[in-house]
Amino acid sequence: MTLIDGKALFSNIKNGLSLQVASMVSDGRRPPHLAAILVGDNPASKTYVNAKVKACKEIGFNSTVIEYPENVSQSELLSKIEEINHSNNIDGLIVQLPLPNHIDENVVTHSIHHYKDVDGFHPINIGRMVLGLPCYIPATPLGIISLLKEYKIDTSGKKCLVIGRSHIVGTPISILMSRNNSIGNATVTLAHSKTKNLSALTLGADIIIVAMGVPSFLKSDMVKEGVVIIDVGIHRVKSDHTKSGFKLVGDVDYDDVKHKASYITPVPGGVGPMTIASLLTNTLQSAKKMIYSHT
Ligand code: GUN
């Protein structure tokens, strides 16, 4: 079994990005600037935004976090987004999800200009991704592709099962894995909450990407020998074996499944850091106007 080390690749990517920032600055340009909107007190969202800001600092990006209380109105968010859309010194804008129920996530995320949409959630970016045109690819799927590339995992002609059809992970990764690309050309099945006999699908799969949101769901008796496992889940569960009384687990029962896998991502330290790596990469591309040549 080979452990797919997302933390190590994250560190390499950060080193590469730092060098690019240093070269921009020495050319007299300002560093890339990522802005994040955070609504309410969701502890997981706070942790994710803090991790994004920390990574920005480490590589010399500017970052701004705009925090709002849980009861902020949708129109207030939209006017802040409009302001940032027109700001000359912010390259990328994300709104951390989930948002409170009174706010329409689609309306909010789609109001971000597609050329600052470094999360890749805007219909223009999603549409361009489907067509194979240059675009911002959502951060978690892009991170998964980078991991598969780094470990030279052969995906061509393989049976790839994606479990979970969210707009953020399952749907885009299922499209990317089926494309005619070096990482791609897989025969993809997209399973979801209405799928029947999931075990038959997991047992037949060469590559399983699990983004279903159920702690330690995938067990060894559900997979075949030599399977490649990408675990997108992250959950804080009670534990008698840690000082804090909690531990982080994914959607895969790692200790159970690892003996049968040829490659597997751990949680933490697998896909999670790569999501941030991809967000930073997208933000640098925006600052350098590599995808869209807006003014
Ligand atoms: N919430 C969970 N994942 C993500 C993500 O990739 N981007 C944003 N903005 N919110 C999230």
Image (cartoon, rainbow, N blue to C red):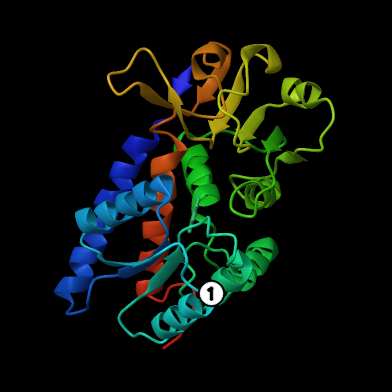
Image quadrant holding the C terminus, namely bottom left
The residue identified by callout 1 is 74
Amino acid identity at mark 1: Gln
Image quadrant where residue 229 sits:
top right
Seen from the viewer's position, the closer of residues 197 and 29 is 197
Instruction: Check the image and report above or below for 13 versus 105.
Output: above
Q: Quadrant of residue 253?
A: top right
Does 225 sit above or below residue 7?
A: above
| Label 1 crowd (10 A; few <14 / some 14-19 / many >=20) | some
Which residue appears farthest toward the front when viewing the image?
71
Q: Is residue 205 left or right of residue 108?
A: right
Q: Residue at x 28, y 43 (%)?
A: 11
Residue 266, image x, y percentages:
44, 27
- Which residue sits at x=42%, y=58%? 40
> Which residue is at the front of the view, 112 or 237?
237
| Above or below for 175 versus 118 | above
x, y (%) of residue 20?
A: 26, 63
Tell me where residue 180 appears, x and y as whole percent. Answer: 68, 51
Q: Secondary structure at mark 1?
A: helix
What residue appears at the point 18 percent right and 72 percent down from the top-left corner? 25
